[in-house]
Image: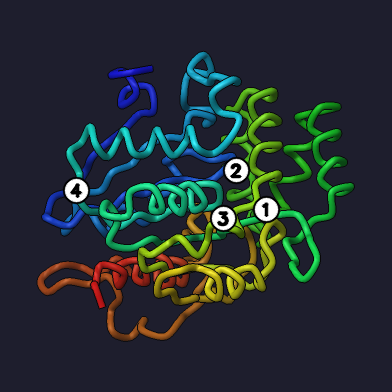
Amino acid sequence: MGHSLLEALNVRVVGSGDRILVLAHGFGTDQSAWQRILPFFVRDHRVVLYDLVCAGSVNPDYFDFRRYTTLDAYVDDLLYILDALRIERCTYVGHSISATIGILASIRRPELFTKLVLIGASPRFLNDKNYHGGFEQSEIEKVFSAMEANYAAWVNGFAPLAVGADVPEAVREFSRTLFNMRPDITLFVSRTVFNIDLRGVLGLVRVPCSIIQTAKDVSVPASVATYLKNHLGGRSTVHMLDIEGHLPTSPPLICWRRNSGERCPGDDEGIGRKEGKKSFNWGIMDRHVANICGLFFSPK
């Protein structure tokens, strides 16, 4: 794609400030996944957003099946974007597959990253001896078969499981972005993702990492967060969210938790409030995602 890559992947830079934040969405979604937490950052940071080449918001003609056989090509895309925007240092927030992409990018170019924020990350989805990734090979093959046999039925079954909470709007939103993807691309990317094994390179990561994991995630067991912390080469911390689902930044989920009346530590302090401005009145997801992410700019 060459110089057209920024346009092809819908790269946007919003906000102002010296600090740079890169938000990279996960499998089955697009950059709209960040729209509810984005206002929290744009007042003080330059925020870079882009769509993975497999996203339904990207022209499927850009997806090269020969090139994107491994995550290395996705890493190439990320590094190209950072270089094209002349970004020298950034905090990188990656969800799901993009968390893995960030891990690999930091190994290749550690000087670019002040910190990695890994949301729902997994170095390997398949179970192995002394490792619980969440899936047996036979289970994965059944998923692939279901996708091939009837993509619509698979989406309708998978979306509620991924969302976790009983939030129909969130299920509809995730279903929408899944349906936007071309089924053959979804299947191809799924095979790539479910066959990764980055356990052997985690020790090469020297960039500080903050790992965000929900208590119940159909795709990533909570124990994987502990595994990452114990095997990443740099300083790392784990933040467990007492919620369900693989999509903690889903806009409908954030709205639902805010409107449901759930409270969390810090609400009384007016999280998101700045002097002279009305509080955002963020709910539990904004408290645990937006505000925790905000702490990651500290070099300590």
Report if the CB atoms under discs 2 and 3 are less than 8 Å apart: yes
Report if the CB atoms under discs 1 and 2 are less than 8 Å apart: yes
Quadrant hosting residue 3? top left
- Which residue appears at 70% of the width and 44% of the height? 195
Residue hosting label 2: 174
Of 224 and 16, nearer the camera is 224
Q: Residue 192 location in percent, x, y?
A: 65, 37
Report if the CB atoms under discs 4 and 2 are less than 8 Å apart: no
Residue hosting label 1: 162
Instruction: Check disc 3: other Cα within 10 Å, few if <14, some if 14-19, many if 20+.
Output: many
Q: Residue 274 location in percent, x, y?
A: 16, 71
Q: Residue 260 location in percent, x, y?
A: 53, 69
Q: What number is the disc on residue 151? A: none
Q: Is residue 285 above or below residue 188?
A: below
Q: Is residue 224 above or below residue 161?
A: below
The mark nearer the N terminus, 1 or 2, is: 1
User: Amino acid type of disc 1?
Assistant: Ala
User: Amino acid type of disc 2?
Assistant: Phe
Q: Secondary structure at mark 1?
A: helix
Residue hosting label 3: 247
User: Amino acid type of disc 3?
Assistant: Leu
Q: Is residue 41 left or right of residue 190?
A: left
**Is residue 105 in view from this perspective?**
yes
Tell us which disc is closer to us: 4 or 3.
4
Image quarter where the N terminus lies is: top left
Residue hosting label 4: 88
Q: Is residue 269 left or right of residue 124?
A: left
